[in-house]
Amino acid sequence: MLKIITGKNNPILKRKSRPIKKIDDGIKQLAENMLEIMKKNDGIGLSACQVGKNIRMFVLPNGLLKKWVFINPEIIKSSKKTDTVEEGCLSLPGIFVSVERSKSIKVKAMDENGKKFTLRVKGLPARVIQHENDHLDGVLITDYK
């Protein structure tokens, strides 16, 4: 059973995640399990490294966007307009940090079926994608202090 890894000094959370080369049933099952864990913990995003898997994948709750599984995501454009909002993290319970992020982004990734997609997003979805993408690069909100 997967569980959320916690601690700002945890080496798993500080390691850069590796790209996924093949989407198989194991990756699809991991995505489903991550969605369940995220929902149980009232999260709005969860990266694979947060459950001990250093691969480039994160999930968002159904309904936040049309796509909710992001495999090998890449932010390809970020707006110059930013805002600063206090963020929390399932891996850092009780810690909140004001983080400046772009208000809108363009991201490309693959879904759980290997289909490539590109999205332009703004507001909360843009912030969540940037937060989760940071996890894939070993960056935590506490690194913004």
Image (tube, rainbow, N blue to C red):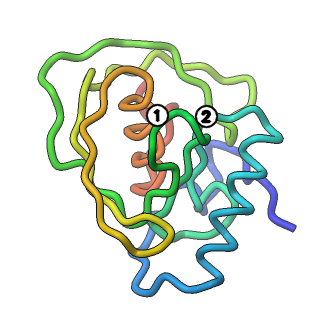
Please give the label number shown on residue 119.
none
Q: Is residue 5 above or below residue 111?
A: above
Indicate the secondary structure of the residue bearing disc 1. Answer: helix
Indicate the secondary structure of the residue bearing disc 2. Answer: loop
Label 2: how many Cα within 10 Å (few below 14, some 14–19, many 20+): many
Residue at horizontal 37 percent and vertical 66 percent from the top: 110
Quadrant for residue 94, please give it.
Answer: top right
The amino acid at mark 1 is Val
Residue at horizontal 33 percent and vertical 20 percent from the top: 100
Q: In the image, residue 49 lies at what x, y percent? A: 59, 60
111 or 42, nearer to the observer: 111
* Quarter in which the N terminus is drawn: bottom right
Q: In the image, residue 70 lies at what x, y percent? A: 44, 57
| Left or right of 125 on screen, residue 42 | right
Q: In the image, residue 95 lies at what x, y percent? A: 66, 24
The reply to whether the C-beta atoms of the residues labelled 1 and 2 are less than 8 Å apart is yes
Quadrant for residue 22, please give it.
Answer: bottom left
* Quarter in which the C terminus is drawn: top left
108 or 142, nearer to the observer: 108
Residue at horizontal 54 percent and vertical 22 percent from the top: 87
Q: Is residue 77 above or below residue 50?
A: above
Q: Is residue 42 above or below residue 77?
A: above
Residue at horizontal 45 percent and vertical 49 percent from the top: 67
Name of the residue lying farthest toward the right: 1
Label 1: how many Cα within 10 Å (few below 14, some 14–19, many 20+): many
Residue at image mark 2: 44
Quadrant for residue 81, please give it.
Answer: top left
Sequence order check, earlier mark of 1 and 2: 2
| Left or right of 126 on screen, residue 22 | right
Q: In the image, residue 126 lies at what x, y percent? A: 36, 31
Please give the label number shown on residue 128.
1
The amino acid at mark 2 is Ile
